[in-house]
Amino acid sequence: MKTIYIVRHAKSSWGDISLKDFDRPLNERGATDAPAMAKRLINKKVKIDAFISSPAKRALKTCKLFCEEFGVKKDEIVLENTLYEAGVNAFYNVVEKTDDDYKSVAIFSHNPGITAFVNTLCNEKQIDNMPTCAVFAVEADTKKWKDFKTAEKKFLFFEYPKGGD
């Protein structure tokens, strides 16, 4: 079994309109929501073997805040350039090249691609939008990440700062 936790970056700041989209930081709420969501996962007894993130500032900071809560060193984060402005295929490509030694991974990225991706994972749960700092979790019946796309999947949960299943 392989488990994937898809995490949209926390709330970002629009305070400096001169910044490129890639360089936008988290705002105050985002900096609070990210560790709170990580704690929710910890309370659910979630184990994460690898943290994979878009290199964009807001996604990477969200990932780092999760790592702090999980007691993982920030230098263990796997940066994946294709997760910035990613489409569905980019997400699957990242998943498929994940080391099979990892049973569970968290992937940090952005909308609109992240919503499109989670809606391909299982028919039993479809969502209109991945809110900021939302986590969508799915378990796949496979031993190899390269088979993740076609493996039978089971929806585990959908959590976000203001709600969840």
Image (spheres, grey):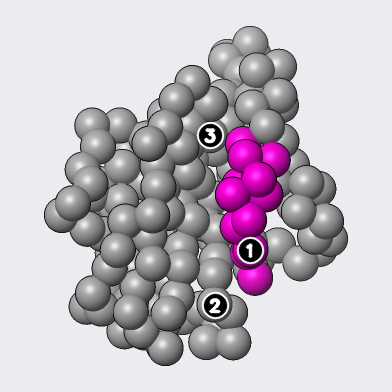
Q: Residue at label 2?
A: 103
Evaluate if marks 3 and 1 touch, with contact meaning CB atoms under 8 Å apart: no
Q: Quadrant of residue 43?
A: top right
Q: How far, Cα to Cα, is label 2 from label 3?
A: 22 Å
Q: Nearer the viewer, mark 2 or mark 3?
A: 2
Q: Residues within 10 Å of mark 3 (few under 14, many from 20)?
A: many
Q: Which residue is mark 3?
A: 133
Disc 3 or disc 1, which is closer to the eye?
1
Q: Determine which residue is flagged by label 1.
A: 47
**41 sits to left or right of 110:** right
| Three-letter code for the amino acid on which mark 1 is drawn | Lys
Q: What is the quadrant of the C terminus in the image? A: top left
Type of amino acid under label 3: Cys
**Residue 135, image x, y percentages:** 47, 43
Residue 54 visible, this angle: no
Is the Cβ of the residue at disc 1 closer than 8 Å to that at disc 2?
Answer: yes
The part of the chain drawn in magenta is 37-49
Residue 146 to residue 108: above or below: below
The picture places residue 149, in percent across and down from the top left corner, at 27, 74
- What's the mark number on residue 96? none
* Residue under the image location 45 percent in, 25 percent down: 163
**Magenta stretch containing residue 48, yes or no?**
yes
Q: Is residue 87 above or below residue 146?
A: above
In the foreground, 14 or 103: 103
Q: How many marks?
A: 3
Q: Does 68 sit left or right of 12 as displayed? A: right
Residue positioned 34% across, 68% down in the render:
92
Closer to the camera, 37 or 131? 37
